[in-house]
């Protein structure tokens, strides 16, 4: 019997009613437009839930009916057959069973990146699955949050099935401007910065998910030195939220973002507290303030066309 990696899954965090409400909102967003990104999300749910795969049949345990139904929908889209959900509301457990594999095509576990073509377990999502793209990173993070994410006191905690999976997800988070930290070589990731928590949830689930989580408004920190600093900080935080929303819209629409616009957006997400002059100076190569502002405006305009 194969699992989603070589390591036994870490004990699942206690998911409060508040966390499950956030998960339900996350599960309600429109599915990825591209099959590749739908596969990345499904693979993350399967991997992070510690699903079992044996003789072509996959079984995953989730603690919300919304996440279970979304997983069945994603797997069906990928060609899986006979997907069912069996619920035990008293224990907050919903079992997803899919399979067996069809005689033609690659086995489901191979398509989900759980094992290689020789049946050997892969400890982390392979690069071909996440695609090296922003939509792939968003989809992978969304799937992991659906399966094992927890929210407490404004901090996102995510237990990963293996150290390699934790490292891969942390690297994907950097593409979103989110620093997911882990202690040593452990398997637990935490996102603690209020602005980054809000950006993560907005990017993966839209403003509705962030609102359910209670993090829709960015934290202004310990207090700026002046009123002008305060206004600049709030404006930058709002700009970061708008960029995160734009990325989420374009990801759902399956739109490839031009490299220059994507880089400008990632720069804003990575440094939500900086004004445009400081942000433009961090670009590679450095940009003028007006050039950076123009790219960000074009990014938001592109997203508006696909809402």
Image (cartoon, rainbow, N blue to C red):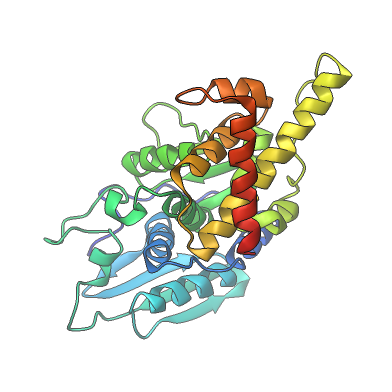
100 vs 20, left or right, is: left
Q: Quadrant of the C terminus?
A: bottom right
Q: As displayed, is residue 76 above or below residue 242?
A: below
Residue at the far top: name it.
Answer: 225
35 vs 122, left or right, is: right
Q: Quadrant of the N terminus?
A: bottom left
Residue at the far right: name it.
Answer: 227
Residue in the foreground of this view, choosing between 208 and 280 = 280
> Residue 256: in sight, yes or no?
yes
Residue 44 picture location, percent across and down = 41, 57
Residue 64 picture location, percent across and down = 58, 67
Residue in the foreground of this view, choosing between 242 and 182 = 242
Q: How many marks?
A: 0
Q: As displayed, is residue 220 above or below residue 106?
A: above
Residue 299 picture location, percent across and down = 59, 48
Tell me the residue at 41%/37% (across/down).
171
Tell me the residue at 88%/20% (across/down).
227
Q: As displayed, is residue 134 above or below residue 239?
A: below
The quadrant holding residue 236 is top right
Residue in the foreground of this view, choosing between 180 and 85 = 180
Q: As displayed, is residue 81 above or below residue 136?
A: below
Tell me the residue at 70%/51% (across/down).
210
The quadrant holding residue 221 is top right
> Residue 204: in sight, yes or no?
no
105 vs 251, left or right, is: left
Residue 75 picture location, percent across and down = 39, 74
């Amino acid at each position: 019997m194969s699992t989603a990696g070589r390591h036994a899954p870490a004990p699942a965090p206690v998911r409060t009613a508040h966390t499950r409400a956030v998960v339900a909102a996350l599960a309600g967003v429109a599915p990825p437009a591209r099959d590749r990104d739908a596969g990345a999300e499904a693979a993350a749910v399967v991997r992070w839930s510690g699903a079992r795969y044996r003789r072509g049949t996959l079984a995953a345990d989730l603690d919300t009916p919304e996440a279970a139904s979304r997983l069945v929908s994603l797997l069906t889209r990928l060609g899986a057959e006979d997907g069912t959900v069996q619920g035990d509301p008293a224990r907050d457990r919903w079992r997803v069973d899919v399979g067996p594999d069809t005689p033609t095509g690659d086995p489901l576990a191979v398509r989900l990146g759980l094992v290689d073509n020789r049946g050997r377990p892969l400890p982390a999502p392979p690069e071909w699955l996440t695609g090296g793209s922003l939509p792939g990173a968003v989809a992978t993070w969304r799937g992991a949050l659906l399966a094992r994410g927890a929210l407490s006191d404004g901090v996102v905690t995510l237990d990963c099935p293996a150290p390699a999976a934790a490292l891969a997800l942390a690297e994907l988070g950097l593409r979103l401007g989110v620093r997911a930290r882990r202690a040593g070589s452990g398997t637990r990731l935490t996102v603690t910065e209020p602005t980054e928590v809000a950006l993560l949830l907005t990017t993966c689930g839209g403003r509705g998910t962030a609102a359910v989580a209670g993090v829709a408004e960015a934290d202004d920190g310990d207090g700026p030195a002046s009123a002008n600093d305060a206004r600049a900080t709030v404006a930058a935080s709002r700009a970061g939220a708008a960029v995160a929303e734009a990325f989420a819209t374009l990801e759902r629409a399956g739109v490839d973002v031009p490299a220059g616009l994507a880089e400008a957006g990632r720069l804003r997400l990575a440094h939500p507290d900086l004004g445009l002059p400081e942000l433009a100076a961090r670009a590679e190569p450095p940009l003028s303030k007006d050039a950076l502002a123009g790219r960000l405006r074009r990014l938001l305009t592109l997203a508006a066309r696909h809402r």
